[in-house]
Amino acid sequence: MKATAPPHPIKLWRAPDVMDAVMLKGQFFGHRYPPHAHDTHCLAVITGGALAVEVRDQRRVCRRGDVVVIDADVVHAGAAGDDGQWKMRVQHVQPAALAAYCERLGIARRERFALRSPFIVDAELSRHLYGVNWCSETDHDRFKRSEALACAVVGLYARHAGRSGNLPVVRREPALIRAVKRRLREDLHARLTLSTLASEFDVTPFVLLRAFVREAGLSPHAFQQQERIRNAMPMLREGRSIAEIGAQTGFADQAHFTRVFKQQTGVTPKVYQSAFS
């Protein structure tokens, strides 16, 4: 049976806080891209179906979870594979915006990604690029959005660029990380981004992210969410209102609290609370 296209399969929006990117979320049916080039970099995550992509002399059928990164002015083409449909999330970034973001992040200024291959299988990178797009679409959690963007850009240069050795060397920073952890524990309601948190401690976002992950084993945003959940658990055991607990521990609303709690514990706050009633 032939698939029927939904009434609104494409969504496009601007993301000023994500390198001023143009974001796309799309489901495509029988579409074919002729050979063309953009004046922007294209960072795409395939989220369903199959897309056959040609970039210069390389061709790949990309499927769910695959990442495609094509620099500006590089000719490429694409067409549906398998059953004639695919879904993807994309961000289009101007070269100058990438260069400016690299400077703010604290790494060498670069206007291109210049990757070894445009086709990438990297679950961590795929998750971060998807997260940036999803968080931007829903206007969700600026801290998470800013950190996911930094992780994606750093991951591209560290693991997939031809000149990965140009990233700065980050020393162990135990005193810095203790101070950042204390800051995040003491203010569960802090509305931060990776950049604003780094500026509080007079380091670059790149240094903060690299040092924190090395010392703590998780990112600053993940640590903040962990501390919020740890503070929520005793209140749940006391039988207090779930909505009230979410608000007191820094979550945007009850749905946000429930989503993060289930991600970290495997159960909803209601199920956890019922075990102690």
Image (spheres, rainbow, N blue to C red):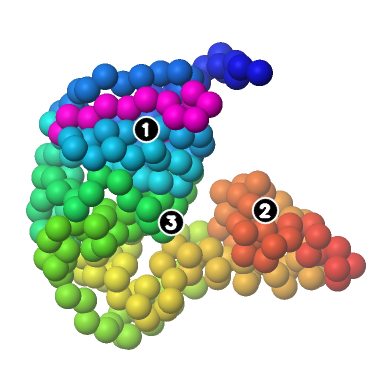
Which circle marks residue 205 in the picture?
none
- Between the C-alphas of marks 1 and 2, the distance is 38 Å
Magenta region: which residues? Answer: 74-91
Which circle marks residue 258 in the picture?
2
The residue most toward the right is 277
Of residues 164 and 259, the one drawn nearer to the viewer in this rendering: 164
Of residues 187 and 221, the one drawn nearer to the viewer in this rendering: 221
Q: Which residue is mark 3?
A: 123
- Sequence order check: which comes first, mark 2 or mark 3? 3
The residue at 41%/32% (across/down) is: 51
At mark 1, the secondary structure is: strand
The residue at 35%/74% (across/down) is: 212
Image depth: mark 2 or mark 3 in front: 3
- Between the C-alphas of marks 2 and 3, the distance is 25 Å
Q: Amino acid at mark 2?
A: Thr
The reply to whether dot 2 and dot 3 touch (C-beta < 8 Å) is: no
The quadrant in which residue 42 appears is top left
Compared with residue 237, is residue 79 higher up or lower down, i.e. above or below?
A: above
Image depth: mark 1 or mark 2 in front: 1
At mark 2, the secondary structure is: helix
Q: Is residue 260 left or right of residue 201?
A: right
Q: Which residue is mark 1?
A: 52
User: Measured from the top left, where is residue 33 in percent x and y?
Assistant: 31, 21
Q: Amino acid at mark 1?
A: Ala
Q: Is residue 31 magenta?
A: no
